[in-house]
């Protein structure tokens, strides 16, 4: 599809729609094009038009390729590149208007969007009309009753609004709701009459009725049907069945998903999944899969921020890529100097130059993470499956854990040891104040219907129509520079606590609830340990308290869990850091709270508040049976332990105050019970 047929988003620019109501432009923050409004997600422009972000095929499209310099948008994190099997990451383009006499490079770059849903309805006559994905003008109602007023004079027809209903399937497909098929109870209805969406009272979908109008042109057949039940589903013999698939045409075969991918301009495909109705703004329409990495220098302090900047110049990076492709880790400083501008790197020593090169491509790195070349080489079937499902978080995060618990001093990762307060010394082994950290967050795909595992290759196929080979592949990402606090529990006390039978029995409830859901949906089972629930809940309690203590908004803080019981990768750490991709991430308010007296106050207030939730005793009592998403929480609700979903790694699941501070029946159950009872 030609790029000119697409509407555009202009990241980083506040701008109204142009051209007398045209819906060709809108504005959005660059980071939002990774999450929550990445490829395949719907958003609403300032004039009310609902659009869907198009695939990566048409990002960075320009009329004159000589005016495009992609190096400005390239971001690198060698660990994340190897994990996601891509050559590089790219920041979403920022919009710069083209001006006469100014530099024309990277101007007028925008991100394409398409109009979705395609169905629109008239607020006055309730008529339904189907428009193309590339419709750039507001849709006007064509009904004859709007052509003249009471005096017989011509009048402008009213604008139509997009319907709130769409259809989704568990394989990530998205389609317009099949109004015509639904009302005629047929997969291929012969009637092409005028459809209307009438509201006949009632608070539910039973009051929304689709009518095939016999009094309008083209004439309908008088069929009508309410939308009652279109969002319903149930499980039968471990197979999910939906009302829309089974009941659209009860006398015919089931109505399965068509495989539509409108964000890629593909309205037909192949899919055998049941389809269900949904509201276009519902939470189950889009679950972005974002993979993140804390930047780890290969050699702490060896590469300055100035050298990082030089090596990422547009005239330097391509040369280094070629050298890496030819000789890899065997490149010498003399080879690098022979190919690069002499004046730029004259002040650098050979040691610094090689350190910068190795840091850029991850050669000779510590830990178990391999390079991109290693990931491209493949391996046995189990290793390949681990790469596809992105399992093995123990190996992935262990290098971060090793470095965060130390005191690195680097331009991109700096931490200090503020010490541990005397009251917390029996519970925390160490505290680190991260004054500088750099996180790269990349979109690798998305799911619909529910948040579940997504294989790497399948996720990439959802992002673009034409797949790229690994050596040219890229994913959209953004880089966050901020601050954080790292806490690590006392290993000996933790091991003694998690061996207690009552602790094991309580955490087993969460394991059983999740196992039932996983078995029912055919998902991969996972082991949820008491230390995981403890650290996860503690992170939420501290974030909720830090909102009041350090001045950040709740959505600006984020958790990162370092949990493992494997002998070679034993971890029990928690990182709370700023997740906002703007100036709010560098105010210094968070690292200040790592001082012993300040942290003791935060922890004490958080634990004290956790003993009694505003909804107790209901919250604590419901926790005995499970509550929250998939009943995977015990004593945890919006009144005590939940945070914005963007701040949580597990979508607010696997939480329990009881394992942190104890329960009403057993106050000594929690890890911090002795601190509260002292």
Image (spheres, rainbow, N blue to C red):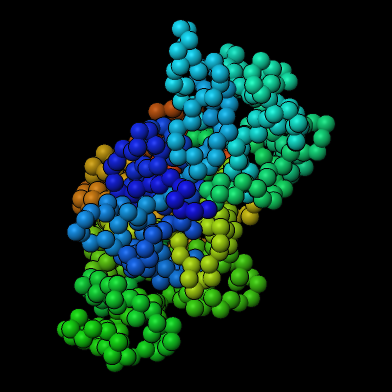
**Closest to the observer, 372 or 147:** 147
Which quadrant holds residue 225? Answer: top right
Q: How many labels sit on residues?
A: 0
Return the residue nearer the eye: 509 or 200. 200
Instruction: Return the x and y of residue 251 as percentages of the image width and height.
Output: 83, 31
Residue 102 relative to residue 267: left or right: left
Q: Looking at the picture, does residue 325 appear above or below residue 602?
A: below
In the rendered image, the quadrant that contains the C terminus is top left
What residue is rendered at 23% in x and 62% in y?
Answer: 103
User: Which residue is situated farthest in the right direction here?
Assistant: 251
Give residue 234's position: percent from left, percent from top: 70, 35
Q: Does 535 sit above or below residue 328? A: above
Q: Residue at x 21, y 72 (%)?
A: 306
Task: Kindly give the residue lying farthest to the top in the view shown.
Answer: 151
* Position in image of residue 465 (x %, y %): 56, 58
Residue at the (59%, 43%) spot, across then down:
174
The answer, for residue 268, to whether it is visible in the render is yes
**Please, is residue 103 above or below residue 281 in the view?**
below
Q: Would you place residue 406 above or below residue 203 in this image?
A: below
Tell me: 28 left or right of 259: left
Q: Residue at x 62, y 67 (%)?
A: 385
Residue 353 rendering spot, x and y as whole percentages: 27, 83
Residue 294 seen from this side: no
| Left or right relative to 128: residue 180 | right
């Amino acid at each position: 599809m030609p790029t000119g047929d697409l509407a555009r988003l202009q990241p980083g620019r506040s701008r109204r729609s142009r051209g007398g109501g045209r819906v060709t432009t809108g504005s959005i923050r660059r980071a939002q094009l990774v999450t929550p409004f990445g490829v395949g997600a719907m958003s609403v422009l300032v004039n009310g038009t609902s659009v869907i972000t198009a695939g990566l095929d048409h990002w960075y499209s320009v009329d004159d390729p000589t005016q495009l310099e992609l190096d400005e948008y390239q971001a690198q994190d060698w660990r994340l590149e190897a994990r996601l099997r891509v050559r590089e990451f790219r920041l979403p383009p920022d919009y710069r208007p083209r001006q006469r006499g100014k530099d024309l490079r990277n101007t007028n770059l925008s991100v394409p969007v398409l109009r979705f849903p395609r169905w629109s309805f008239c607020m006055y006559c309730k008529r339904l009309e189907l428009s193309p994905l590339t419709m750039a003008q507001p849709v006007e109602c064509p009904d004859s009753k709007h052509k003249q007023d009471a005096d017989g004079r011509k009048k402008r027809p009213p604008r139509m609004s997009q319907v709130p209903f769409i259809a989704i399937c568990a394989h990530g497909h998205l389609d317009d709701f099949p109004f015509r098929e639904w009302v005629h109870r047929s997969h291929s209805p012969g009637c092409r009459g005028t459809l209307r969406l009438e509201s006949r009272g009632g608070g539910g979908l039973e009051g929304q009725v689709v009518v095939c109008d016999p009094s309008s042109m083209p004439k309908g057949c008088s069929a009508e049907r309410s939308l009652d039940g279109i969002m319903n589903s149930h499980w039968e013999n471990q197979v999910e069945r939906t009302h829309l698939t089974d009941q659209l045409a009860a006398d015919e075969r089931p109505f399965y998903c068509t495989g539509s991918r409108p964000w890629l301009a593909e309205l037909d495909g192949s899919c055998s999944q049941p389809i269900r109705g949904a509201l276009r703004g519902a939470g189950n329409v889009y679950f972005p899969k974002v993979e993140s990495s804390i930047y780890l220098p290969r050699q702490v302090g060896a590469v300055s921020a100035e050298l990082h900047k030089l090596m990422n110049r547009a005239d330097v990076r391509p040369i280094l890529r070629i050298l890496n492709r030819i000789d890899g880790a065997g490149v010498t400083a003399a080879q690098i100097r022979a190919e690069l501008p002499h004046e730029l790197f004259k002040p650098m020593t050979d040691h610094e130059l090689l350190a910068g090169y190795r840091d850029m491509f991850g050669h000779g790195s510590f830990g178990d993470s391999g390079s991109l070349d290693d990931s491209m080489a493949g391996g046995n079937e189990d290793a390949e499956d681990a790469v596809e499902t992105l399992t093995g978080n123990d190996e992935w995060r262990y290098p971060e854990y090793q470095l965060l618990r130390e005191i690195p001093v680097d331009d991109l990762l700096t931490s200090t040891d503020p010490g541990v307060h005397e009251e917390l010394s029996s519970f925390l082994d160490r505290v680190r104040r991260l004054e500088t950290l750099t996180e790269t967050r990349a979109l690798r795909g998305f799911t619909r219907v529910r948040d579940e595992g997504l294989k790497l290759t399948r996720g990439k196929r959802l992002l673009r129509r034409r797949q790229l080979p690994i050596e040219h592949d890229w994913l959209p990402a953004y880089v966050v520079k901020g601050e954080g606090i790292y806490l690590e529990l006392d290993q000996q006390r933790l091991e003694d606590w998690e061996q207690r039978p009552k602790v094991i029995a309580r955490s087993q409830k969460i394991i059983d609830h999740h196992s039932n859901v996983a078995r029912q949906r055919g998902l991969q089972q996972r082991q949820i340990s008491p230390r995981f629930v403890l650290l996860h809940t503690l992170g939420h309690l501290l974030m909720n308290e830090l909102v009041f203590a350090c001045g950040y908004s709740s959505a600006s803080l984020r958790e990162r869990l370092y949990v493992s019981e494997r002998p070679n990768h034993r971890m029990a750490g928690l990182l709370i850091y700023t997740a906002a991709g703007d100036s709010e991430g560098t105010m210094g308010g968070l690292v200040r709270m790592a001082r012993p007296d300040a942290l003791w106050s935060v922890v004490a207030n958080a634990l004290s508040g956790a003993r009694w939730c505003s909804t107790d005793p209901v919250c604590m009592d419901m926790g005995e049976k499970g509550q929250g998403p998939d009943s995977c929480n015990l004593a945890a609700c919006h009144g005590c332990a939940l945070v914005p979903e963007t701040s949580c790694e597990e979508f607010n699941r696997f939480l329990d105050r009881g394992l942190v501070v104890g329960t009403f029946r057993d106050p000594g159950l929690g890890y911090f019970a002795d601190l509260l009872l002292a």
